Amino acid sequence: MSVIFCRKERAAHPYFIEYLGAYVYTPQELCYAIYNHPLLAMDGFISRNLIDFIRDELDMGFAALKMERWMKSGENPDELIFIFLQEAEYYSGTEINRLRQKVSALRKLPPLEYAKKKADSLMEFKQYGKAIAGYEKILESPLSERADSSFVGKVWNNLGACHARIFQFGKALDAYDKAYLLLKDTEVLKRIYYLTRLRPDIQLKERYQSIVTEEKKEAWDKEFQQAEEASAQSEAIQKLDELFGRDPVKRMEGAGQVLETWKQEYRGMA
């Protein structure tokens, strides 16, 4: 996460945002995190612990008091986001209204679409275990039976990407197989082929034999080799990000972002 610092004072005890795998030390950093990742700030992110941090560590007692009163009122919890942003005075009124519109639009999404955006965001920030749980919940929902096949296919694809990134190649193959049956997308088929390169015991299913031509194999082998060469001096997970990190229909923003540490990776698996 990239943040512009606007004041020198830093919290003695920073607040850890697990969603981003980052600590925040200043009001500006917290504003930046909320404003640029609204899905982070929705659904319980602003807790009593965070309000305590805002009051005690960021020296924003009045903001914390307003937030506490609003929380006790039981009214729309999304308003807590805007109370903090207004009191921090880091973003203009126009920018805050723009975020308000974005949050409102997210809330109006059908439940499964909202859930997918949440899981996609978790995957973007390497919280693979939580993303997997989110995708699986979507697929287990009775609503998924009535959802558009393209939507369900994208969920299966991204579930496969998460499994591949944490080396669960068997589960990745199963998810990609279901994604391809729904999407008929060559990019998904290519990832299935990549799994056979990463795990020699994984074989292409018979139904793919005629589709994966020698010409395709040659082109995909070349891409695979390029990814290997690009990651020769880096962690293996970076290669997996490169091979499995993109939505086949709409490429995710932030795909290819490098993991900061293996510790963060395994935290995301929990």
Image (cartoon, rainbow, N blue to C red):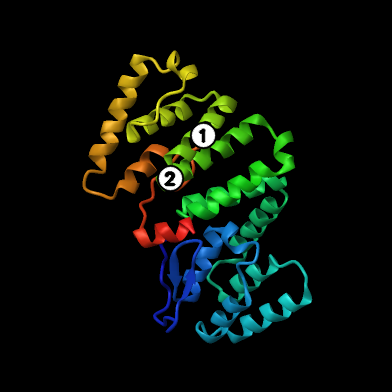
Give the label on residue 174, or none.
1
Residue 70, given in percent of the width and then of the height, sits at: 73, 76
Foreground residue among 89 and 83: 83
Given the current orientation, which residue lies at the most extreme front position? 201
Q: Residues within 10 Å of mark 2 (few under 14, many from 20)?
A: some
Residue at 62% x, 35% y: name it. Answer: 152
Percent coordinates x, y for residue 16 in the rendering: 47, 71
Q: Nearer the viewer, residue 67 or 119?
A: 119
Give the distance between the C-alpha atoms of the residues marked 1 and 2, in whole angstroms.
22 Å
- The structure residue drawn at horizontal position 70% and vertical position 38%, both measured from the top left corner, is 144
Amino acid, disc 1: Asp
User: Mark 1, mark 2: which one is toward the viewer?
Assistant: 1
Q: Is residue 140 above or below residue 181?
A: below
Whether residue 172 sits left or right of residue 115 in the image: it is left
Q: Which residue type carries mark 2?
A: Ala
Q: Residue at x 58, y 82 (%)?
A: 52
Say which mark, if any, is on residue 270. Answer: none
Q: Residue at x 59, y 70 (%)?
A: 85
Image location (x, y in percent) of residue 61:
60, 86
Q: Nearer the viewer, residue 88 or 49?
A: 49
**SS of the residue at dot 2?**
loop
According to the image, label 2 marks what residue? 255
Query: Between residues 68 and 224, which one lies in front from this camera angle?
Result: 224
Q: Earlier in the sequence, mark 1 or mark 2?
A: 1
Circle 1: is it few (<14), some (14-19), or many (20+) Cα within 10 Å? Answer: some
Q: Is residue 207 above or below residue 103?
A: above
Q: Quadrant of residue 145?
A: top right
In the image, taking residue 157 as reference, residue 235 lies left or right, namely left
The image position of residue 229, as x and y in percent, is 23, 38
